[in-house]
Amino acid sequence: MSTSPVLKVEGITKNFGGVRAVDAVSFDIYAGDFLGVIGPNGAGKTTLLNLITGFLKPDAGKIFYQGKNITGWKPHKICELGVARTLQMVRPFYHLPAYKNIIIPLCSPRALKLSGSKYGERDDIALDYLEEVGFERDTAVPYKPAGILPHGYVKRLELARALAMQPELLVLDELFSGMSMSEVASTMFVIEKLREKGITIIMVEHRVKELVRVANRLLLLNFGQKIVEGPPMDVVSSPEAIKAYLGTSEEVEQ
Amino acid sequence: MEQGKKQFRKERIDRGIYARSMDIFAISSWQEIAYLLLPRIVPVILLLAMPLILELSGNTYWAKVMVVLAILGIMSMSWDLLRIAGMFSLGQALFFGLGSYISAAFNHYFHWPIFLTIPAGTLGGALLGTVLLTGTLKLRGIYFAMVTLAFPLLLVRAIQATNFLGGTEGVATDAFPNYWVAAYVSIGALLICFFGFRRLMNSDWGLVARAIGQDDIAVTASGINVFWRKIQVLFIASGAAAFAGTLITHLLMYAGLSSFSLDYSILPVASVVIGGSGNFAGALLGSTILTFATEALRALGPLRIALYAILMVVFALTIREGIFPYIERRYHQFERKVELT
Amino acid sequence: MAGVIIFGLAKSLELALIAIGFSFVFGISGIANFAYGAFYLLGGFLAYIFFTSVGLPYWVAAIVSMIILFVIGALMYRFAVQRIRGAMLSEVIVTMGLGIFIIEMLRATGFIGHNRYLPAFIPGYIEIAGVGIENQRLMIIVIGLLLFLILWAVTRYTRIGLAFRAMSQDELTALSIGLNNNYLAMLSMGIGAVLSVIAALCIIPQGFLTADGAYEVLIYALAVGVLGGLGSTIGIIVGAFILGYAQTITATLFSSQWVMVVTFLAIVLVLLIKPSGIFGKQKELEERV
């Protein structure tokens, strides 16, 4: 395990007009880590992910990936370095068949460099990725337009899209929201397999129970600020976490 | 239960070729080959043969119509290409005018022959058009439409103000050597454009372009440089439209402010709305309809534009997919009434 | 110098009058009404017809024209735009198509040459600070300011104005609290049409009633809207002033032919820096992820 962090976030801040969505957040992630990001709604989790993946420019602070300063880089350039994300508001290409949704990331510079595939081969590679996330291969499902797929399938399609870029850092934004228990279990299995391959993962999630079992570190965000960071059980049982989610006993009694 | 009154419902059935599903073609008989191939081959043969047929009718006026058909067809396909990639342009006349003027300039001032001015106009129009619109690519759809609408008008005023390239008078140019060159260069280019664009959009490059048209943020999240891809699409589309502009220059033997007129921006839109967007066959169909309508309705004069505009509106409100998808669907399906039992 | 200030003021309010109708509709219902120039032309044309051929007193002709355009605007929304509401491409195609249809039909009724004009409200001119200025231009300033005052008062102090503001902020929320968005959009289109007629009646007397002028009006409305921010009344005023003075200064220093070029350069510059305009409310790409 290397000693320098894969991702280093230093004091990044983002304002939207008068609202401070992310407030001087700093943390480090090392190779192979699984960082869970939790916090109440509106805490700034998705904004934080947007900042890390380049969809937003921070107003202050720096971000380093594998030692490179990627602050202010455009999203596709960050993807080339090996960062892939899923979008919280899932956006498949509705009119394209599911497997063609995967061909798009296969055409990205990084995927082309790593796999060198040619036109015609990509269909099979796309189907492989879909199978990996749980689409039944020899049925009509991968060929259906993405717009008619049930929500659980769409979320897994989103995951496959991120995987097709062969990332070293995978950023997941509320992947499990809207999934049934069995879908969560099977997808969690996929993510654990990714972990074994050594992929670093950041995961924003509301289902803290699942997260606690697989993550090796947890970060609690509230009002844009980092409240607590550390091993999952410590964070979950910390007084700050309880206060963030449930309020203090005075507030509860009122 | 009503007695003695039969009730029906409409049923749509695909014709008995199950090979059409999932883009897999399994052909097992001459009938199936003909079924699939004829609709594609016949229009191409017709287009190629038309100049011959019309020439035999003894009227060289029809060469002009061939060229106009090619121009409108190429412009429509160029517009459709941009639309598929998510760029809704109301200013195809910009590229058209640029191509027209550039080829005219090379012809008039440097005395280049036609076979040089046409490529020069195409390339120059593509380059200049792309450069001009690069800054606007990040705009949201409606703002992009507004800017493209105003661009040709800007150039018209700039030319008027500076009296550059002939000012309001325009520039005189050579004509095509003869009828055959005019007709076959145009039709040939039309067909190359048609098959070329289709091939392009069926490739993975085209798939990414189509995805950009649907959701450019998701494409960015998939690691692709959307801006650069859009520039490539813009270059190709503007090149095609500029090529059409060079054709008009040598057809009319003149290049002037009229090359930037609103008609050249709107007619392609009307053709595609009528014919159907998404596959370039609709653009071709729509432009054929409009071109022949223009000839047939010559008596109406300037009212024709009003007619096309209202046709465009009617189609946009009712048969939104366009004529071609409708025909295609009816070709592959048939409806029948089935009695409810 | 005094001339530039005064004419600039008149020009700015003229542009503001042109732009407000378009921006109003866009701000409330999100519809870019590309038939705006056609409404402008049609309103002027109807006033002309009622005044000359039918022989009504001018102010009656004006009011009748406004009422008819209100109905046309509302009906156009109800029967054309409402069906394809939300599909931006279709909205533009339909409004643009209808606009072209109207303009070209009117053109065919004989708009050749400059033989049609609308009378000024108060003919003649007066002198201010040594500069002669037509009364009509002064009227534009007065009417423009009055109009903006009325619009501001209506949107701030009436119930319907409140409904409009709600819709312009978030249509779905407005829908969920019981506002009928189709009815409001229909009203807004009608009002937008009336605003275009008012602009036409003020501005056309300075020149002539021409079909090409209709397209230019649309471009100017777009230019001011883009510059200042569509949907924001303050934005329209600011944008109109910037553009108005830029145009007046250009016309004075260079020639009137460069005016359009300057207009356009202004649009492009603003679009490159802040696409939604100076006071624009459209969310930037960043916030849409």
Image (cartoon, helix red, strand yellow):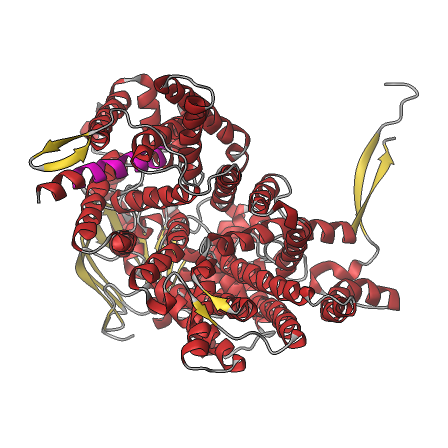
Q: So how many labels did they put on this image?
A: 0
Figure quadrant of the C terminus of chain A: top left
| B24 magenta-colored | no
Q: What range is drawn magenta here?
A: C8-24
Judged left or right of residue C197, residue A141 is: right
Q: Is residue B36 above or below residue A237?
A: below
List the single residue furthest toward the right: B4
Judged left or right of residue B320, residue C85 is: left
* Quadrant of the image occupied by residue A198: bottom left
Residue drawn at x 40%, y 20% is C61
- Counting from the top left corner in percent of width and height, residue A156 is at 51, 55
- Counting from the top left corner in percent of width and height, residue C242 is at 19, 45
Q: Is residue C154 above or below residue C201?
A: above
Residue drawn at x 34%, y 26% is C164
Main SS, magenta region, reads: helix
Give the camera-side residue of B306 and C54: C54
Residue drawn at x 42%, y 45% is C212
| C13 magenta-colored | yes
Q: Is residue C213 above or below residue B203?
A: above
Give the camera-side residue of C77 and A182: C77
Give the camera-side residue of A80 and C56: C56
* Quadrant of the image occupied by residue A76: bottom left
Residue drawn at x 28%, y 54% is C257
Give the camera-side residue of B189 and C282: B189
Residue A195 visible to an observer of this rendering: no
Judged left or right of residue C124, residue B64 is: right
- Counting from the top left corner in percent of width and height, residue B44 is at 72, 68
